[in-house]
Image (cartoon, rainbow, N blue to C red):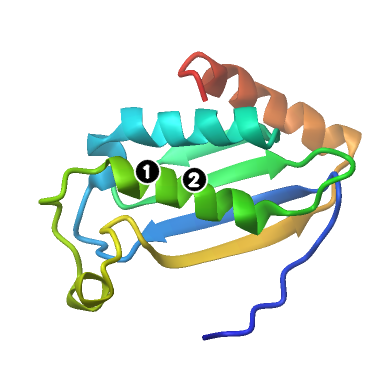
């Protein structure tokens, strides 16, 4: 198992790209309601702000800001992915390696995070994305 070095920046703002293991699928848009529910449950249990999000059929990009006393984004992602995967129909196609391990099709084929420096300018830039996104209930 890889030994990732993750930035732990309490109150930090992070950019993420998360992709399905099976890039030919379109689970994220076909089951957007389930993805939204997984996000909502995690935000209620472990608060964070979704500053912006773009959901495409096989991957998503998002910008989060964590609470001032919390830098743990990886546990949040783990629970969001598990919440989404557990709600998918059992018949969803999985890659051979994930099927052998009993993992869901929504497993992460690749992801990355970038800690972002925030300033008044960047906060104003993301305000437009936030107001557009909020109408979808993220």
Left or right side of 28 for 2: right
Q: Is residue 4 above or below residue 93?
A: below
Give the residue furthest to the top.
135
Q: Position of residue 109 (x, y in %)?
A: 38, 68
Q: Residues within 10 Å of mark 1 (few under 14, many from 20)?
A: many
Q: Position of residue 137 (x, y in %)?
A: 49, 18
Element at label 1: helix
Q: Is residue 17 above or below residue 40?
A: below
Residue at 15% x, 52% y: name it.
92
Residue at image mark 1 = 84
Q: Position of residue 12 (x, y in %)?
A: 82, 48
The residues bearing labels 1 and 2 have C-alpha atoms spaced at a distance of 6 Å
Residue 109 is marked as: none
Residue 96 visible from this viewpoint: yes
Element at label 2: helix
Residue 56 visible from this viewpoint: no
Residue at 79% x, 53% y: name it.
71
Contact, mark 1 vs mark 2 (Cβ under 8 Å): yes
Give the residue furthest to the left.
91
- In the foreground, 6 or 88: 88
Residue at 58% x, 54% y: name it.
16
Residue at 34% x, 33% y: name it.
34
Q: Residues within 10 Å of mark 2 (few under 14, many from 20)?
A: many
Q: Position of residue 20 (x, y in %)?
A: 34, 59
Left or right side of 82 for 126: right
Left or right side of 100 for 4: right
- In the foreground, 128 or 38: 38
Residue 80 is marked as: 2
Tell me which corner region of the image, top left, top right, bottom left or bottom right, holds residue 5: bottom right
- In the foreground, 119 or 13: 13
């Amino acid at each position: 198992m890889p030994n990732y070095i993750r930035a732990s920046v309490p109150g930090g703002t992070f950019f993420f790209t998360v992709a399905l293991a099976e890039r030919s699928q379109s689970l994220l848009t076909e089951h957007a309601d389930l993805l939204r529910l997984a996000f909502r449950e995690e935000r209620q249990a472990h608060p964070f702000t979704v500053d912006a999000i773009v959901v495409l059929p096989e991957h998503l990009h998002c910008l989060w800001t964590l609470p001032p006393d919390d830098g743990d984004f990886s546990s949040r992602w783990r629970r969001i992915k598990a919440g989404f995967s557990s709600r998918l129909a059992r018949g969803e196609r999985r890659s051979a390696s994930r099927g052998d391990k009993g993992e869901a099709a929504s497993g992460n084929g690749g992801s990355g995070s970038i800690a972002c420096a925030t300033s008044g300018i960047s906060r104003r830039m993301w305000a437009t994305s936030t107001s557009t996104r909020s109408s979808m209930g993220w």
